[in-house]
Image (tube, grey):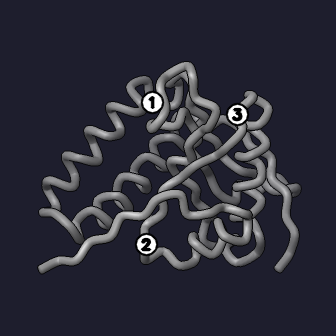
Amino acid sequence: MDTQQVTLRKMTPAEYHAAAEHREAESVHALSKFMPEELARERVRHGTAHFLPDGPDTAGHHLVMAENGSGEVVGNAWIGPDPGQASGSADSAWLYDINVFEPFRRHGYGSAILAAAEELVAREGRTALALDVVGSNEAAIALYRRSGYEVSSMSMRKNL
C-alpha cells in the first residue's frame, strides 16, 4: 500500500451539504437495522442539529476536506469535541466521521486522513482522538487497529 499524505482544509458550503447528506444517509442505513427507518431518520436529524447547530461554522468542530499532493479531494472528516467529556475540560477530541472517496480507496488515504486529523487535534493541545465504529465495518476496524487505536468500550446486541 502506498504511503500518502493529505492536507486538510475547511469544507465549502456545497461540500458541507454533500458530506452531511452522505453522513446522514449512512447513519440512517446503519440505525435502520435496529429501529424503524423513520425513527432512525429522526434520530440522525436530531443528532446533526444537536452537534452542529451552526453547520460547518459550529465552534470547536472541524469539517474538513482532504486533498492529496496533486490537489485532488480524496475524502473528508468531521472532528470535534469528545461528547463523553465535559465541555471545556476535554483532553480528547472525537472523530465523528471519516470518508475516503471511492476512486481513492485502498491506496493509503484513510491512514493519511486519520494521521492529519490526529495532527490537527494535537496542535490544539488534545492528547487523544476517540471514535465509534460499527462492528460490521471490518475495513474501518482494520484501519484503526493499524493506526494504533484500541477498543476502549464495546456494545453488543442480539435481535430476538
| Residue type (three-letter) at the residue carrying disc 1 | Gly
The foreground one among 8 and 94 is: 94
Q: Earlier in the sequence, mark 3 or mark 2?
A: 3
Counting other residues with Cα less than 10 Å from the Cα at mark 2, is it few (<14), some (14-19), or many (20 or more)?
few
Residue receiving disc 1: 55
Which of the marked residues, 2 or 1, is nearer the chain's N terminus?
Answer: 1
User: Residue 9's spot in the image, x, y percent?
Assistant: 72, 38
Q: Position of residue 140 (x, y in %)?
A: 57, 70
**Amino acid at dot 2:** Gly
- Mark 2 sits on what residue? 135
Q: Earlier in the sequence, mark 3 or mark 1?
A: 1
The C terminus, quarter of image: bottom left
> SS class of the residue under badge 1?
helix
User: Which residue in the protein does label 3 denote?
Assistant: 126
Residue 78 sits above or below residue 3 on the image: above
Image location of residue 116, percent across then percent down: 77, 48
Q: Which residue type does callout 3 highlight?
A: Arg
Structural distance between the alpha carbons of marks 3 and 1: 23 Å
Q: Secondary structure at mark 2?
A: loop
Residue drawn 58% across and 77% down?
139
Q: Is residue 59 above or below residue 74?
A: above
Which residue is found at the position 38% from the left and 62% from the top?
26
* CA–CA distance in space, label 3 to label 2: 26 Å
Q: Position of residue 117 (x, y in %)?
A: 71, 46
Examine the rendered structure and indicate whether residue 35 appears above or below residue 39.
below
Q: In front: mark 2 or mark 1?
A: 2
